[in-house]
């Protein structure tokens, strides 16, 4: 396996775990229902995959791969480069999130899951640039990750709650998620368009480069996700078809997994 | 809500008007220019990139026609935007063909590399 394929795997694990931890931690705040989720496992996966991803970055940027893990090289990267300080902040917040889950401190877990996800925006393609444009791009990226995290992270507790709570509770839960869901989907699409514009210079990606093709694939998957989400909301939910809704959510989760794989590949592809 | 809407519009305008960023540093311009013939031997090599770069992780080497390395100073960026990498050439360059090989790391940690030649012909 090449360094790039490892990077894709660690990126997938990290982005997925960070978005899930965030979305699940926020779920009780709007749904008003406690949820059982292996938050500690998510935090471990997020931190370990972040460290592995960072090791790949160290190997990649080192002029001499044999000295990639020398204390001097690590110090140079962490303290003397701008992407290094973004990584340092991100790793510290990831470690903080894990510590908070060990102590089962709910509010710190929620806060750190937000900060962990937000600081993820600083270590990708959106981190390039300077000035107000740079700040705008970072904000759009943070909102994109956050809205996606609320959507993805809400689906799992919702899916579980469907099988366990009584009918009134179930309906209330689904309605609350739907309300949040509309906002999240809208923000994902809006910030997604802004990010494409910022990174490629066009509002619609061109299919002439590998990056453009991956973006089209991502758009295609989002194009599949939206009708499924709409079906879940307007058919399964309104008609109280709970088992159909449950299957619909499973389909949404499967498409989300595909989107995250494409996103992981986008990060290692030059946006030309 | 009005404040939020106008903030959103401002962010939107920024994106609509901003020039695209390619996130990988490509060589935009070099002094001595790529493939050029210069009369006066340069005392420094200036490389301008499409993206801000990390000087501490960037490497530039210069070889003469026989492939021998020419001693260079430490590369450094000149301005706050960190788009231009300057490498001092301490010794005088004799006439001949020189090859510049560069490998830079952009501020978002992507590595790009390339090379070009120039000729010193007084």
Image (cartoon, coloured by chain):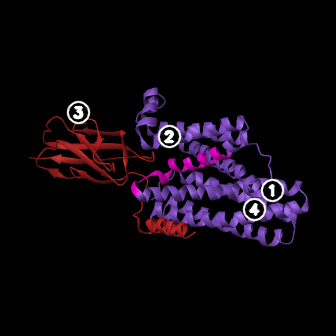
Q: Magenta span: helix, strand or loop, mainly?
A: helix
Query: Label 4: few (<14), some or many (≥20) within 10 Å?
Result: many
Q: Which mark is residue A159?
A: 1
Q: In this view, does B12 lie to the left or right of A166?
A: left
Question: Residue A112 at x, y = what percent?
Answer: 63, 44
Give the CA distance from mark 3 to mark 2: 29 Å
Q: Mark 2 points at which residue?
A: A57
Residue B36 horizontal side relative to residue A230, left or right: left
The secondary structure type at the circle numbered 3 is loop
Residue density around tag 3, few if under 14, some if 14–19, many if 20 or more, within 10 Å: few
Kind of element beneath mark 4: helix
Q: Same chain, marks 3 and 1?
A: no
- Secondary structure under the numbered disc 1 in the rendered image: helix
Q: Which of marks 1 and 2 is nearer the N terminus?
A: 2
Question: How many angstroms separate mark 4 from mark 3 (CA)?
Answer: 64 Å
From which residue to which does the magenta span run?
A110-131
Q: Name the residue under label 4.
A: A177
Query: Quick check: do tags 4 and 2 share a chain?
Result: yes
Closer to the eye: label 4 or 1: 4
Distance of mark 1 from mark 2, alpha carbons?
36 Å
Is the residue at mark 4 from the same chain as the one at mark 1? yes
Query: What's the chain of the residue with tag 1?
Result: A
Quick check: can you spot residue B21?
Answer: no
* Residue at the spot 68% in from the left edge and 37% down from the top edge: A100
Nearer-the-camera pick, A102 or A253: A102
Mark in the foreground, 3 or 1:
1
Contact? badges 4 and 2 (CB < 8 Å): no
The quarter of the image holding the N terminus of chain A is: top right
- Count residues near mark 2 (Cα–Cα under 10 Å), then give few for <14, some for 14-19, many for 20+: some
Residue B71 disc label: 3
């Amino acid at each position: 396996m090449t360094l790039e394929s490892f990077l894709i795997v660690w990126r997938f694990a990290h982005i997925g775990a960070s978005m899930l931890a965030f979305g699940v931690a926020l779920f009780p705040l709007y749904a008003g229902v406690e949820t059982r989720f292996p938050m500690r496992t998510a935090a471990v996966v997020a931190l370990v995959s972040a460290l592995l991803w960072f090791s790949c970055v160290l190997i990649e940027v080192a002029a001499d791969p044999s000295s990639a893990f020398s204390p001097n090289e690590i110090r140079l990267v962490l303290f003397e480069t701008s992407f290094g300080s973004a990584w340092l902040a991100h790793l510290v917040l990831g470690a903080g999130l894990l510590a908070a889950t060990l102590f089962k401190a709910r509010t710190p877990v929620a806060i750190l899951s937000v900060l962990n996800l937000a600081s993820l925006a600083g270590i990708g393609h959106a981190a390039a640039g300077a000035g107000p444009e740079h700040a705008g791009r970072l904000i759009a990226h943070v909102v994109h990750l956050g809205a996606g995290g609320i959507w993805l992270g809400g689906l799992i507790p919702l899916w579980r709650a469907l099988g366990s709570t009584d009918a009134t509770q179930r309906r209330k839960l689904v309605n609350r998620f739907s309300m949040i869901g509309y906002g999240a989907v809208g923000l994902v699409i809006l910030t997604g368009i802004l990010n494409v514009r910022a990174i490629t210079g066009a509002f619609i990606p061109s299919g002439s480069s590998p990056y453009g093709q991956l973006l089209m694939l991502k758009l295609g998957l989002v194009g599949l996700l939206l009708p499924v989400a709409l079906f879940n909301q307007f058919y399964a939910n309104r008609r109280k078809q709970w088992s159909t809704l449950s299957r619909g959510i499973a389909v949404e989760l499967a498409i989300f997994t595909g989107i995250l794989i494409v996103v992981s590949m986008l990060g290692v592809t030059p946006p030309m | 809500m009005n404040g939020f809407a106008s903030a959103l519009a401002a962010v939107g305008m920024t994106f609509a008007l901003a020039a695209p960023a390619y996130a990988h540093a490509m060589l935009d311009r070099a002094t001595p220019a790529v493939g050029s013939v210069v009369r006066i031997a340069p005392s420094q090599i200036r490389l301008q990139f499409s993206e801000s770069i990390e000087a501490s992780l960037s490497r530039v080497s210069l070889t003469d026609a026989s492939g021998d390395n020419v001693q260079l100073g430490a590369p450094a960026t000149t301005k706050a935007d960190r788009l231009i990498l300057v490498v001092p050439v301490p010794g005088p360059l004799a006439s001949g063909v020189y090859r510049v090989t560069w490998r830079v790391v952009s501020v978002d940690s992507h590595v790009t590399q390339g090379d070009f030649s120039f000729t010193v012909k007084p």
